[in-house]
Amino acid sequence: MGPVDVDAVRPRLDGGRVAFVRARDGRRFVVKQHGTDEGFARELRAYREWLPQLGEAVPQLVAAEPDRRRLLLTHVDGENATDVPADSLREELAHERAGAFLARLHRVVPSEVSRTFGAELAARLAARLPRLQTAAAITARERAALERYAERIGRLDAVEVGVCHLDFSPRNWLIRPYGAVVVVDFEHTKRDALTRDLCRLAHRSWRGRPHLRMAFFRGYRRRLTPNQEHQLALYAGLEAVTALSLGMDVGDPGMLQIGRRLIAEVTGNA
């Protein structure tokens, strides 16, 4: 690529950073340096094994430096979906096209129905609770309620598992000038419960906005079964604990607020 000019550098929540650079021939790239080995390994695997099938719906991997946890990606021109005016037609179209993208991602490898994955998710939730209570992030009553959520998740016996983004929300969607949606940030991507990819949307973006949910499923072209709707409702407990844990780890007040709201809701319903 040769010498480059750096247009901007932004810190990442995991301690890494993202640099937006421009080659002397005018081509633009993104240099993404991860703060953790796990996030780098997940994103590199996604770009090498799964994302090539999605073409221009994702950035393209140009090069990787594992010893520095760095990825060189093509730059995508687009407006972040969080900046689109609320309740506008553009916002609705973004959710519809995001649904179409997620349907493609979920089909890059055949999914399978697991009888044990619910127990794995329950174990993840339960493992985070002692630390949260020790840090006074949750009360003993809230912990008991979340443990009941974990027990219910653990009893799920038919969980569809496939390739998931696992941070699928408007902040990771870029809207191209002609309206197409490009999805970014695959550091959480792995095989997981497909309905978990709807958690950020269901418990944040779609709250009180059913038209966005309807638009998404127009693009997704597949309705949730009653069993999957039940799973999505239960995953609110896992989403609450995830948001609160992340907010604590990186000192993000907004994420802490989301976590506290969800904790209050799920513990009130447990």
Image (cartoon, rainbow, N blue to C red):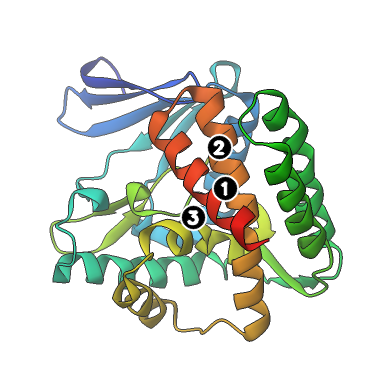
Q: Which label is found at residue 52? A: 3
Q: Left or right? Give the position of 247 relative to 176.
A: right
| Quadrant in which the C terminus appears | bottom right
Front residue of this view, candidates 10 and 204: 204
Task: Tell me the residue at 22%/24% (across/down).
Answer: 23
Task: Tell me the residue at 83%/73% (across/down).
Answer: 157
Mark 3: few, some, or many residues within 10 Å (few <14, many ≥20)?
some
Residue 34 visible in rendering: no
Q: Amino acid at mark 1?
A: Ile
Q: Earlier in the sequence, mark 1 or mark 3?
A: 3
C-alpha gap between disc 3 and disc 2: 33 Å
Residue 39 to residue 91: above or below: above
Residue 150 to residue 94: above or below: above
Residue 44 to residue 79: above or below: above
Residue 214, given in percent of the width and then of the height, sits at: 36, 80
Q: Secondary structure at mark 3?
A: helix
In the image, which is nearer the foreground, mark 2 or mark 1?
A: 1
Q: Amino acid at mark 3?
A: Pro
Q: Which label is found at residue 263? A: 1
Q: Left or right? Give the position of 179 relative to 208.
A: left
Q: Earlier in the sequence, mark 3 or mark 2?
A: 3
C-alpha gap between disc 1 and disc 3: 38 Å
Front residue of this view, candidates 66 and 205: 205
